[in-house]
Amino acid sequence: MSYHHPPPLPRFCPYCAGPLTERWVEAEERPRLVCPQGHITYLNPKVIVSVIVEEDDRVLLLRRGIEPRRGYWTFPGGYMEIDESVEECALRESREETGLEMELLGLVGIFSRPAPAGPGIVSIVFRGRVRGGQLRPNHEVLEARFVPTDAIPWEELAYDTTRQALEAYLAQRQSSLSR
Ligand SMILES: [Zn+2]
């Protein structure tokens, strides 16, 4: 299993259905996917919104039940839809994956996995807590557990951005506790 699954490049122009080829675009000083009529298809990152759900000294971790990175741990989150806000996405994804209603408490940070090393992702991570519902993970999740912050499985996290966000969360938590 590879570390990431970059999306296949689009092959046809979304405007005229002509074949796309990679060409240097002088005005933009980089290669782009261009059709014979000159339409440019831009490749931009996708946005993922997630929530680190806290309960006392524990955070909610999910073991991924789907590829990529099946069997590795992450927190609730997923791809943003075109017609929702980042907050709506955070609440929807965590509800779908866990059955829990969340309350967002603030931003942990924004992290990225740029191409070509990653699939081209911007990851927005909130801090949150449970407001209602019952922990009932969906089919995308093998296991859901509140894990003590000193027992986070650092070697079995799904992505670099998962680790970065948890580190940022713990650093914020530490500084707010010592204030
Ligand atoms: Zn075209």
Image: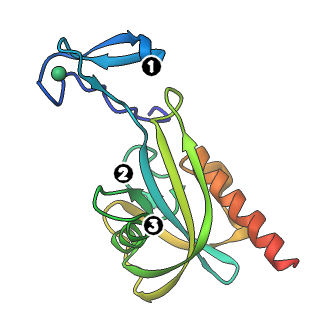
- Mark yes or no: residue 150 visible: no
Residue corresponding to mark 3: 143
Callout 3 amino acid: Glu
- Mark yes or no: residue 172 visible: yes
Q: Are marks 1 and 3 in contact (CB under 8 Å)?
A: no
Q: Residue 66 got which mark? A: 2
Instruction: Tell me the SS state at disc 1.
Output: helix
The residue drawn where x is 49% and y is 30% is 115
Q: Quadrant of residue 42?
A: top left
The residue drawn where x is 54% and y is 39% is 113
The outermost residue toward the bottom is 132
- Mark found first going from the N terminus, 1 or 3: 1
Q: Is residue 103 above or below residue 150?
A: below
Callout 2 amino acid: Ile
Instruction: Tell me the SS state at disc 2.
Output: loop
Residue corresponding to mark 1: 28
Q: Residue 136 got which mark? A: none
Marks 2/3: CA–CA distance? 12 Å
Q: Where is residue 156 drawn, in percent x and y?
A: 60, 51
Q: Is residue 25 above or below residue 120?
A: above
Q: Residues within 10 Å of mark 2 (few under 14, many from 20)?
A: few
- Mark found first going from the N terminus, 2 or 1: 1
Marks 2/1: CA–CA distance? 38 Å
